[in-house]
Amino acid sequence: MTRTIKNILQLPWMVKVTHTFIEGNKVADGLESMAFSRPIGRVESGEQLLSTFGFVGK
């Protein structure tokens, strides 16, 4: 795992940081709501999260 992280960090990244108001990012808003409505330690699969926001099966 450590080797994988080190390899990822050595890639030639180009990063652009932008600000988006919460009203413009409904997925992030939904994830934040989910984080505070679930017990600590509960992990959901990526597919469960995607289906929550309507991205699976389209």
Image (cartoon, rainbow, N blue to C red):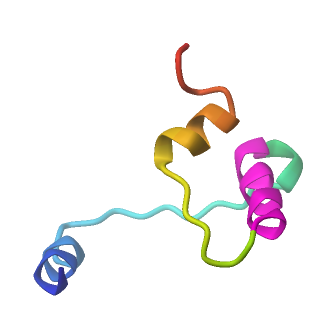
Residue 37 higher or lower than 52, as above or below: below
- Identify which residue, 55 or 21, lies in the foreground: 55
Would residue 38 be found to the left or right of residue 10 on screen?
right
User: Is 27 a magenta residue?
Assistant: yes
Residue 24 higher or lower than 32, as above or below: above
Quadrant of the drawing holding the N terminus: bottom left
Residue depicted at x 78% and y 50%: 30
Residue 6 image point, x, y percent: 17, 83
Would residue 31 be found to the left or right of residue 15 on screen?
right
Would residue 2 be found to the left or right of residue 38 on screen?
left
Quadrant of the drawing holding the C terminus: top right
User: Is 21 a magenta residue?
Assistant: no
Numbered marks: total? 0
Residue 1 higher or lower than 48, as above or below: below
Q: Quadrant of residue 20?
A: bottom right
Q: Main SS type for the magenta part?
A: helix
Name the residue at the right extreme.
Answer: 23
Name the residue at the top extreme.
Answer: 58
- The residue stretch that appears in magenta: 25-38
Residue 29 image point, x, y percent: 80, 53
Residue depicted at x 53% and y 16%: 57
Q: Quadrant of residue 41?
A: bottom right
Residue depicted at x 82% and y 69%: 36
Q: Quadrant of residue 50?
A: top right
Residue 11 image point, x, y percent: 17, 68
Residue depicted at x 15% and y 75%: 4
Residue 53 image point, x, y percent: 69, 35
